[in-house]
Amino acid sequence: MFVIHPLTMKQQGFSLLEILITILIVSFGLLGMAALIISGARSNNIAHYRSVASKQTEDIADRMRANRAGLIAGAYDDLAATTPNSGDCVTGECSETQIATYDHAQWNAANAQLLPGGVGTVTGTVALGYRITLRWTEKGMNEADLTCPAGVPANTRCFVTRFAP
């Protein structure tokens, strides 16, 4: 007869401690993956806003090129962040200055709609060129953007372009 001594028996299966350690390691891995997904989504959102800002600066530059007489008259030399009141220059007739005001109103209305807290400004002259600046609020950005003008609050991202007609 063959007898197995109790001290020489081999353990079969997993202990509760090994299972708990495995669960802990897997949990840390899943948390890391979730953090990567959130970071990727945030970066994708930032890239989207920068792409929109790029297209919006092209929009106002194209509007300025299309209204050459208004550009030469200085109607685009200082477009503020506020959206002006404007008549409808699509269906009615407008002067060069009225077209510039219409362009300014349409552009900043689109900025506000496409970017969170989006506003745009244009400064400069035909001779020196123009500086187009778009600003928008970006969540999670706790520092100041160095491309923004002085006095811009934290959590504000700026996109600055130079334009020579």
Image (tube, rainbow, N blue to C red):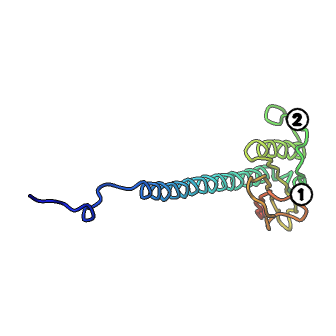
Residue type highlighted by circle 2: Gly
Residue 99 — which label?
A: none
Q: Residue at x 53, y 58 (%)?
A: 28
Label drawn at residue 77: 1
Residue at the location (89% across, 38% down)? 86
Considering the numbered disc 2 on the image, is that residue within a helix, a strand or a loop?
loop
Give the x, y percent position of residue 94. 87, 39
Point out the tag, 1 or 2, that comes first from the N-terminus.
Answer: 1
Q: Going by the picture, which residue comes out furthest to the left?
A: 1
Left or right, 114 with reference to 79: left
115, 96: nearer the viewer: 115
Q: Quadrant of residue 5?
A: bottom left
Q: Could you give the CA–CA distance between mark 1 and mark 2, rounded to whole angstroms? A: 20 Å
Classify mark 1: residues with Cα within 10 Å, few (<14), some (14-19) or many (20+): some
Quadrant housing the C terminus: bottom right
- Counting from the top left corner in percent of width and height, residue 78 is at 91, 56
| Residue type, label 1 | Asp
Residue drawn at 73 percent across, 44 percent down: 114
Compared with 37, 105 (above or below) is: above
Return the x and y of residue 133 as percentages of the image width and height: 81, 58
Q: Would you say 43 lies left or right of 97 here?
A: left
In the picture, measured across the screen, residue 85 lies left or right of residue 119, that is: right
Question: From the viewer's perspective, is residue 118 above or below residue 25?
Answer: above
Question: How many numbered discs sit on the rendered protein?
Answer: 2
Q: Circle 2 sits on which residue?
A: 87
Q: Residues within 10 Å of mark 2 (few under 14, many from 20)?
A: some
Quick one: which residue is furthest to the top in this view?
A: 91
Residue found 91% across the figure and 62% down from its top: 151
- Please say if the residues under marks 1 and 2 sit with CB atoms less than 8 Å apart: no
Instruction: Out of 96 and 49, give the one closest to the viewer.
Output: 49
Along the viewing direction, whichever of 149 and 88 lies nearer the viewer: 149
